[in-house]
Each structure stands twice: as structure tokens, then as C-alpha cells.
Image (cartoon, grey):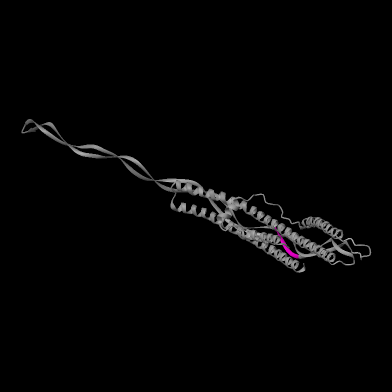
Amino acid sequence: MDKRSFAIALTLISLQVLAAEPDNQQMLDTEISNTQLSSPTSCTLNNGNNVDAIKAKFTEVISSEKSKIEQEAKAIKDDMPELNPGEAAIQVDFTFRDEQMELIFDLPSVTMVDTPMSMDFPEVTMKTQTWSWDVPQTTMELQCTPGVPETVVEGGTCEAFGISFSCPKVTIRPGKDICLHVPVITMARQEAKLDVPEFTMKRQDWVIGVPETRMERQRVVFNYPALVVTDVKATSADMEKRSQELTQRSKNTFAGISTAMKSEITLASMQNINKSFNCQKKQLAAQVRKAYDDLNALSAGAQASVDRARAMKATPEILSTLGASSEKLKEAKKSLLTQYAKARRDIEAKRKEVLVKMSDSLGEQQHVAAVTQ
């Protein structure tokens, strides 16, 4: 296996695993918000079609390499020197013999296994409750108090000893009322119907298909043209060397093709497994999305009740009760996202386990190829 293929294999693993999990609630929140409600109905794998396509591709490669080797063999024959009569003939004949090459390597045998999953989803209802409380109200009332008493002196007639005469008569009368607008505080009964969330956490179970993978020894057999030197007469050192080099190069070429085929089949399987695991994550996210949307709507309603009660100057006790309900909804959403993150990590752990096994298999193939070539 070449370095490029091995790098691709490692990339398939590292990118998926290292970038798999959002690291905070805000990122999880954004991810769920962007999730499509329509999830894939099934997550299937089909490695068979990939193997057949790769075999067809490398059959063309083998045919092309055979043509190149045939041209080199013809060039060697054309370069043979012409000898004078009586000299020993120098002749080298090349033929191609179809031989079978059996590729033995480990490929993942994947079956989709129904795996039960469970998560605590909130069951929430908004219950309308009537709340009442006394609110102080201030009004301005006109209040009057008597003014300062006034002394009034008027002319009058006095009588003494049978004699009448003029004299002043003094009387006291109330002063003019003093009126002012005075604030008066009264308690007014306020009543409001507010929506209060009531909810319980209920465990819900569902089943998703998760790839169950085990490595199985696979055999792929194909024919390749083996170069054979069929007739050598009156050996020439130069011709013999060129013939041997071409034979060895032919052998190495087809061995390299077989190694490349192994790598490509394994990498195609890894890509298929990646697609399947990504599909599982989409199904999981869609499952969580509906509960997430419900919680968001209920949270908005609960906060609206708090804002309305505050605007109506509800008592601290009522505001505290409504605020506690709103906080419970926020905690429920946080719990939902935490459980979602854990389920994602479980899927990623399975993905990593499978891909690491396959990467190890690719590494072993690379080592075997280096030893046998």
C-alpha cells in the first residue's frame, strides 16, 4: 500500500473522531437547530458493488501493463544482433501465460444490527392558572380642613339701665375651608390567567440500525499475464540480463497492482462505513429535534408568562414560582442536549473501533507488501 493510501486511511479516522463532538451547550444547540426533521429512513452498506467496480478497474490496469511489457519484450527481440552464417544463433522468445493471483486480506463484514437506544424526553403541558394579588394604587383626593376662625366686629345696640346706645358687637365665625389634593393609597385586587408549564421526564425507547463489524478474511482471485522466457539459445550476457530484468519487473508490477487493489477495496469499505455512521448520527439528531423544538416553544411561553406577571406587578412569590418553572424548562433542554451528546459519543466510539481495526489491517498489508516485493 502506498503512503498516499495510508494517509487517506488515517485521515478518515482522525477527522471523524477529533471533530465529532461539539464541546459546549451552545454548539450543540446550534447543531440541533440546523438539523433537518426528515431523517434517512435506513442506513445501509453495500461493499459488494464497490469490490466489483474496483476489480473491473484493475482489470483494465492489468491489460494496460501487459501491453507495455509486450512492447518491451518485442524491443528486446528486435535488438538482437544479426550474426554471420555459421555463428551460433542467439534467440530469446517471450510468451505470456495466464496465471491466477489470489489476494488474501481482511475486510470488514458489516451487518446492520438493531440497537436499542433510550433517552429521557420531557413531557410538558402548559396549564392555565388564575393568579390574584393585591397591588397598591395611589389616587389624589381633594380634602378640606376648616380655615382659621375669624373675629367679626359689627355695629350694634347696647342697652343698660333702660338706656339704649350704639356699641360694637364682636362674633367669631369659622374661617374659609382650605382644600388640597392629597395622595391616598388603596389596595386593588389584580387577577391574571397565566400559562404555567407542568412537565415530567419520561424515558422513551427507540431502535436504530448500527453497523456491527467484524474483520473476515476475504479472497479475491483474478488472472494476470505472467511473462515467461520460453527459448534461449546461444546466450548473450546482455540479452540475458535484459530478459531477466523484464521478467522481474513484470512480477513486481503485478504484485504492486495486487497491493493497490487491496488498499483501494479496504479504503472503499472504510468510506462506506463512515457514511453509515454519519447516517446514524443524522437519524439520532432528527429524533431529538422534535423534543428540542417543543422545549423551545414552551420556554418562550413560560418566559412570556413571567414578563406579563412582572409588568402587572405580581408579588415576589408569584414571580418566583413562574421563574422556577421557566428555569426547569431550561434545565430540561440542557439535559436533553447532554444525553444527545452522550449518544453521539457512543456512535463515534463504535466508528473509531471499526476504523482503527481497518487501519491496522492496512498497515499489516503495507508491511507484507514491503517484505514480499
Depth check, front residue: 49 or 116 = 49
Q: Quick one: 249 or 74, which is closer to the camera?
A: 74
Quarter of the figure with the C terminus? bottom right
Q: Which residue is drawn at 36% across and 45% down?
A: 185
- The answer to whether 77 appears left or right of 212 in the picture is right
Left or right, 154 with respect to 351, comes to left
Q: Is residue 350 inside the magenta stretch?
A: no
> Does residue 14 appear to the left or right of 226 in the view shown?
left
Where's the N terminus, which quadrant? Answer: bottom right
Q: In which quarter of the image is residue 217?
A: bottom right
Q: Picture coordinates of residue 85 (x, y %)?
A: 94, 62
Q: Overall secondary structure of the magenta stretch?
A: strand
Observer-nearest of 32 and 69:
69
At a point 43% along the width and 46% down the height, the residue shown is 189
In this picture, is 156 found above or below 232? above
Whether residue 313 sits left or right of residue 210 in the image: it is left
Residue 82's spot in the image, x, y percent? 89, 60
- What residue lies at 74% left-to-right and 61% top-to-bottom? 263
Q: Which region is colored magenta?
A: 209-215
Figure quadrant of residue 181: top left
